[in-house]
Image (cartoon, helix red, strand yellow):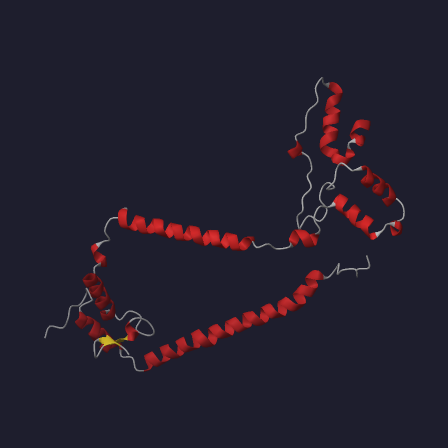
């Protein structure tokens, strides 16, 4: 129990399990670092699981002692130093934008263009010919039939055709 | 540090006071554009079309063009 309390800086839950395990066995269950709580600068996590600085320098230790007294006695620099013990980047720093979007957009457009070249090659060398229904004469006959049926004669196709003069309306 | 204390509460309410009426106004405006730009002209177009529409003449024209399977072109 004393051992787990001494190691409380690095996260109570994971280590106390290891310390308890130590009691009855020859070896110690080693906790991998990725299983321990981590520090993260994230906009929606204002209070990360652990402090940023885990191993305090002697200056920082004395500063932490001074923090236990009256806070009005701390200078502005000391307050900032205390902040940077607990946190890495301030909100202003972590949320500032970058110019990365230009690279991303450039990369996206470049690869879309590359894909277009691949598709051109594919259309020319992989696909077979289109069906005969795409021939211009066949398409003309299709269109004539649609006009004969008066497709969409109110606002659509047939409404744009001049039936007396057999041409598109001007 | 003698910074003023930042806004701690009411942030959503403040945003909504501006954006909610704006959202309503823009939606109504969009609906208005659709109504007067699309549906009203379409109603008038149909009204105009059916004012002088003769279905029998229409049918005869289609019949002469030979698109029907039940009737062929008139045998004259």
Q: Quadrant of residue A146?
A: bottom left
Q: Position of residue A43 (x, y in %)?
A: 66, 51
Please identify the quadrant where the C terminus of chain A is shown.
bottom left
Image quadrant containing the N terminus of chain A: top right
Q: Nearer the viewer, residue A113 or A33?
A: A113
Q: Is residue B11 above or below residue A155?
A: above
Residue A160 image point, x, y percent: 29, 75
Which residue lies at the image location 38% right of the left edge and 50% below the top edge? Answer: A115
A4 in relation to B34, above or below:
above
Instruction: Tell me which corner region of the image, top left, top right, bottom left or bottom right, holds residue A4.
Output: top right
Q: How many marks?
A: 0
Q: Is residue A154 left or right of residue A99?
A: left
Q: Which residue extends farthest left?
A: B76
Describe residue A149's horizontal placement relative to residue A18 as left or right: left
Res. A169 image quadrant: bottom left
Spot occupied by residue A48 in the image (x, y as percentages of width and height): 71, 44
Residue B43 pos. (x, y %):
40, 77
Q: Residue at x 11, y 72 (%)?
A: B75
Name the residue at 79% across, 47% down. A81
Residue at (30%, 82%) from the top-left corner? B52
Query: Can residue A1 be seen at all in this image of the molecule?
Result: no
Looking at the image, residue A75 sits to the left or right of residue B70; the answer is right
Q: For this rendering, which residue is in front, B60 or A116?
A: A116
Q: Residue furthest top?
A: A26
Q: Is residue A100 visible?
A: yes
When the figure is inspected, residue A12 is found, relative to residue B55, above or below; the finding is: above
């Amino acid at each position: 129990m004393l051992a787990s309390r001494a190691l409380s800086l690095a996260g109570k839950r994971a280590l106390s399990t290891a310390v308890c395990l130590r009691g009855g066995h020859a070896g110690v269950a080693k906790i991998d670092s990725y299983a321990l709580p981590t520090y993260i600068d994230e906009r929606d996590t204002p209070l990360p699981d652990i402090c940023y600085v885990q191993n305090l320098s002697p200056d920082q230790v004395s500063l932490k002692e001074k923090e236990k007294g009256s806070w009005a006695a701390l200078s502005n620099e000391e307050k900032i130093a205390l902040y940077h013990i607990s946190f890495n980047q301030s909100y202003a720093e972590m949320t500032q934008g970058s110019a990365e979007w230009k690279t991303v957009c450039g990369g996206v457009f470049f690869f879309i263009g590359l894909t277009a070249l691949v598709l051109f090659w594919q259309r020319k060398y992989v696909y077979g010919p289109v069906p005969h229904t795409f021939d211009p004469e066949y398409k003309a006959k299709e269109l004539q039939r649609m006009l004969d049926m008066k497709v969409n004669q109110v606002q659509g196709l047939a409404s744009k055709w001049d039936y007396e003069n057999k041409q598109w309306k001007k | 540090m003698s910074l003023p204390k930042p806004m701690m509460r009411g942030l959503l309410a403040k945003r909504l006071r501006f954006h909610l009426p704006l959202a309503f106004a823009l939606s109504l405006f969009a609906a208005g554009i659709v109504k007067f730009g699309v549906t009203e002209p379409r109603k008038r177009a149909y009204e105009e079309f059916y004012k002088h529409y003769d279905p029998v003449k229409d049918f005869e024209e289609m019949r002469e063009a030979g698109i029907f399977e039940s009737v062929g072109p008139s045998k004259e």
